[in-house]
Amino acid sequence: MASDPSVNPKRDEGHSIAEAEEIKTKLEARKTEIISGEVIVFAEDECHLVWDDTIRFGVGPANERTEVPIVNAKQRQTYYGVMNLANQEVIVTPCERGNGKNSHRLSQVFTGAVPRIKS
């Protein structure tokens, strides 16, 4: 049965449940390697902030007017992050923008942060 192209898979609960089960099955199959540290599992995400979303007010002396110059009302910042699910270590890296090029570059940075196991 083909999936409905008008339904966003991220919003399709059935698809999300099936995908979660698939991930669970893959992790279970490698459980011994994960526990031994031969395989490291990361959760990865990215976050896009618009400065106005995080800064709403300023505090200053009550009897003085405080002026804050706004250079770019739509200044944005993207953060990429991964968490090692075994030891809960988190690595967060800021980036100018979220795109495929930066996603690929940062996956190499995160991979390089993992010590290699020698056999």
Image (cartoon, helix red, strand yellow):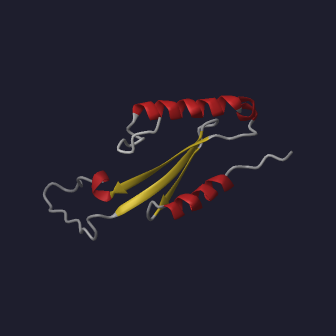
Quarter location, residue 106: bottom right
Is 104 in front, or is 60? 104
Residue 96 placement: quadrant: bottom left
Which residue extends farthest bottom? Answer: 71
**Identity of the residue drawn at 43% across and 63% down:** 97
Identify the residue at image location x=22%, y=56%. Answer: 60
- Residue at the outermost front position: 1
Which percent across, then down, holds residue 27?
65, 32
| In the rendered image, the vertical position of residue 38 relative to residue 57, given as above or below | above
Q: Is residue 107 left or right of residue 33?
A: left
Q: Picture coordinates of residue 62 (x, y %)?
A: 15, 54
> For this rendering, which residue is in front, 50 or 26?
26
Can you give x and y, in whole percent of width and height, for residue 34 in the image? 71, 34
Q: Residue at x 38, y 38 (%)?
A: 11
Tell me the quarter of the picture where residue 98 sits: bottom left
Residue at 63%, 58% in the rendered image: 108
Decide: is 4 above or below 57: above
- Picture quarter with the C terminus: top right
- Residue 65 or residue 92, whichever sits in front: 92
For this orientation, the residue located farthest to the right is: 119
In the displayed structure image, the side of residue 98 where residue 87 appears, left or right: right
State how many labels appear.
0
Q: In this view, does 23 lie above or below 102?
A: above
What x and y, as percent, mark residue 105? Answer: 58, 62
